[in-house]
């Protein structure tokens, strides 16, 4: 039996850049895909811990719009892995009443994986447990330019007027329209950059970088990061009192 952990404050929305799978594998003389495979185990552990700690929204960066430029063999294996993941994980998602959501340019995902993805989204739509979002074929710049183009169309079709444009309306045109902005962002793998992830949404997000490679990240590492979050004082531009 695990001891009960409590936190002074917990992020309602946790976002994670799951980086370092390839380096983790290469260091062990394994193929990069082995690192991705181990990364799935980390994701499962983090999802379980997030539920235990009462985190409401979890958003994970799984594949960026720039990752399409990787060698075709790696892209193909990642797409296969995604499809298998969704098939294998569905009973777990159902059992935990996790609602699965995707953000990104899904049109680019190969047909069979896309079908699986839409099917799982549909089947978990009514659940009110953890709201799990997987960023797939996702890039902030692409998201923002798609939003601008949709707004243009809606003005042209008189659905909205130019005077309606503001921060609230703009947020509603992003892929993340259903989810609040992240409170906390963790990046594993040692790099200190955002790599085109949620640039608009993380304006006031607390950020945590760790050298731990994603396949080595689990419950213990998450607790460590959340302990750091507890100490942060979020001012949102105001003064403390
Ligand atoms: C993150 O791990 C997963 C994806 C981007 C698909 P990487 O594949 O980027 O692993 P490193 O950063 O090369 O070690
Ligand atoms: C960011 O990792 C994307 C994901 C984790 C899915 P990358 O490995 O693609 O980022 P860079 O290329 O090191 O910036
Ligand atoms: Mg990487």
Image (cartoon, rainbow, N blue to C red):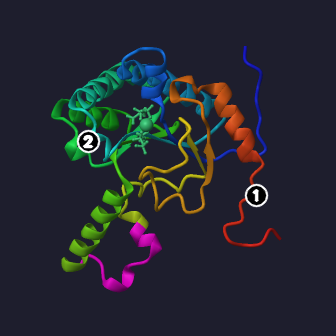
Residue 69's disc is 2
Q: Position of residue 208 (x, y in %)?
A: 63, 45
Q: Which residues are magenta?
A: 158-170
- Residue drawn at x 25%, y 78% as measured from the top left: 155
- Residue drawn at x 38%, y 56% as measured from the top left: 140
- Residue drawn at x 46%, y 27% as measured from the top left: 23
**Foreground: 43 or 52?**
43
The quarter of the rendered structure image containing the N terminus is top right
Where does label 1 land, which residue?
A: 233
* Residue 6: quadrant of the picture: top right
Answer with left or right where residue 115 lies relative to residue 180: left
Q: Position of residue 226 (x, y in %)?
A: 69, 40
- Residue drawn at x 52%, y 41% as measured from the top left: 16
Say above or below: 50 vs 102: above
Answer with left or right where residue 116 lies relative to residue 220: left
Q: Which of label 2 and label 1 is nearer to you?
A: 2
Q: Position of residue 83 (x, y in %)?
A: 28, 26
Say above or below: 59 vs 183: above
Say above or below: 160 vs 73: below
Circle nearer the N terminus (2, 1): 2
**Foreground: 30 or 186?**
30
């Amino acid at each position: 039996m695990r001891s009960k952990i409590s936190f002074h404050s917990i992020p309602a929305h946790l976002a994670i850049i799951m980086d370092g799978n390839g380096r983790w594998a290469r260091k062990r003389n394994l193929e990069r895909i082995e690192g991705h495979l181990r990364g799935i185990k980390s994701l499962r552990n983090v999802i379980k811990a997030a539920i235990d700690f009462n985190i409401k929204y979890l958003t994970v960066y799984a594949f960026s719009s720039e990752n399409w430029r990787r060698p075709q063999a790696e892209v193909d294996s990642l797409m296969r892995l995604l499809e298998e993941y969704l098939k294998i994980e569905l009973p777990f998602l159902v059992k935990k009443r996790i609602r699965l959501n995707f953000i990104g340019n899904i049109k680019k995902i190969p047909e069979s994986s896309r079908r699986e993805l839409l099917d799982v989204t549909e089947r978990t739509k009514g659940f009110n447990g953890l709201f799990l979002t997987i960023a797939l074929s996702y890039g902030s710049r692409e998201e923002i330019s798609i939003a601008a183009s949709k707004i243009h169309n809606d003005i042209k079709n008189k659905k909205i007027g130019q005077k309606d444009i503001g921060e609230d309306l703009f947020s509603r045109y992003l892929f993340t329209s259903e989810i609040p902005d992240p409170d906390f962002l963790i990046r594993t793998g040692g790099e200190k950059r955002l790599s085109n992830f949620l640039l608009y949404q993380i304006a006031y997000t607390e950020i945590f970088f760790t050298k731990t490679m994603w396949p080595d990240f689990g419950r213990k590492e998450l607790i460590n990061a959340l302990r750091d979050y507890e100490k942060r004082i979020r001012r949102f531009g105001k003064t403390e009192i």
